[in-house]
Image (cartoon, grey):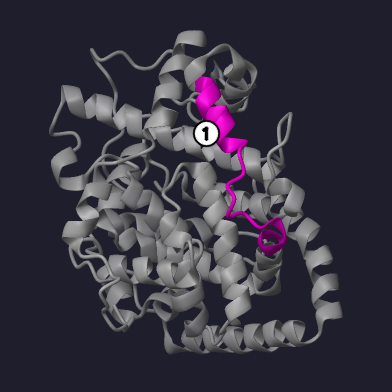
Amino acid sequence: WGYEFEWTRQHMTPEQMRPLMFSYDVLATECLDRLDELAPVSLPSKAGERRTKPSGKAATTDGELTLDGKEDPGERGGHHRRHRDLFELLRQQAYHDETLQRLWAEVNTVPEWVDWQQIERGQHVFYRYVGPFLVGLTFQSLLGGMAFHRVVETLARTGGFGMGAARRRLLETFQHVLDVTEGLEAVQPGLGQGGKGWASTVRVRLLHASVRRRILRLAASDPEYFDVARYGVPVNDLDSIGTVLAFSASLIWVSFPRQGIFLRESEIADYIALWRWVAYLLGTPTDVLATPTAARTMMESLLARTDEVAPSTASQDLANNIIASLAGQPPTYPSADFLRAEAYWLNGHALADALAVPRPPRYYTVLVAGQCLFFMAMSYAKRAVPAWDRRSIRRLRPMLRAVVLEQAGGRDATHAFKYIP
């Protein structure tokens, strides 16, 4: 798909990666079972269950469950449902249950490899190149990531990138990135809630466990619903590794070069270190992020798998849903053709065609080229003038959060399991 590299002994073959399709964050799943005993929640009964169809199109919101601890109107029908906050339950009950205490202790324990100064520098890297980061995250990591058909099988069943939900899902993703880059204290554990990014990441971990458990339960009663032998366990270790790499390695070595941006070795090491800590909080194996070389090698191993990067019809639906959800929307009101040009520039013609993204007029490709030149000028200038870089970071942090929160209706993301299959 347009990315070339030299295969080495350190790269993993499909056979070596296969066990990762069936391993997962067992501890978080066990904690969900305990939390359900402490605070039961009603789900659709198995008799007459209304499931989310495995399609990229608009998914049902029947059985919606969010985790913000408030009563809000349902997205359909205007009725109210009482929500649980699994993170708050975990925090409150952690010292009253052995299983919950194990998870709470894990996310509050800082591994010896964590260097807080390096992680803070990694946060600065994000804001130094924030334009290329956001473009790469949207069009290469998320839209291009829909080419990984196994991951799409899970996404399609939870409706997260259905036509009616794609914009909300993107905003939640951006909020999580802003949470973990807000400042050093934001990603550090604490005696109470800990930092916003730390708590947000633990919430995402519980969300992943909820999705995994729900789909596995449905597959147990109806094997045709989800083929575990073919796709692996939902939200498995391989999927989780791929997701973290999409937010780190693929941006550094795929998205950035395609936008004319090349990071310094020190910047790469700092940014990878930030996402290694996030991976640890998510319950994701961290060895693949131990060094920049290890992260790049694992990313390339995944890209080399023709059985993984194989867009399906659902992949095409979800990729085009992302474009449709952003076209003509604030704050920049981009046209659909401009967004399609971004998709072609960041993913290459072969992959964009495979995702059935309509080809844009050449005019919009020229606009994207101009955008890349602008990003190059701004990014390299800030890197060359440290004082400007520091001022820019202080200004951008509150500005970006304000913009994303405004688009999200003024509410912080709760990383809720809203579309229960």
Query: Which amino acid type corresponds to the residue marked 1 in the rendered image?
Result: Ala
Magenta part of the protein: which range?
Answer: 100-120
Question: Residue drawn at (56%, 20%), measured in percent from left and top?
Answer: 84
Measured as percent of width and height from the top left, residue 398 is found at 80, 56
Please count the marks in the image.
1
Against 247, is 65 above or below?
above
Question: Residue drawn at (72%, 47%), measured in percent from left and top?
Answer: 186
Q: Kindly report the secondary structure that dominates the magenta region of the rendered protein.
A: helix
Q: Is residue 13 visible?
A: yes
Quadrant location of residue 242?
bottom left
Tell whether 190 sits left or right of 230.
right
Question: Residue drawn at (53%, 60%), measured in percent from left and top?
Answer: 326
Quadrant location of residue 85?
top right
**Other residues around mark 1 within 10 Å, as few (<14) / some (14–19) / many (≥20):** many
Q: Is residue 323 visible?
A: no
Helix, strand or loop at disc 1?
loop
Against 397, is 168 above or below?
above
Measured as percent of width and height from the top left, residue 335 is found at 53, 70
Residue 118 drawn in magenta: yes
Against 239, is 251 above or below?
below
Quadrant location of residue 86?
top right
Mark 1 lies on residue: 416
Measured as percent of width and height from the top left, residue 161 is found at 41, 48
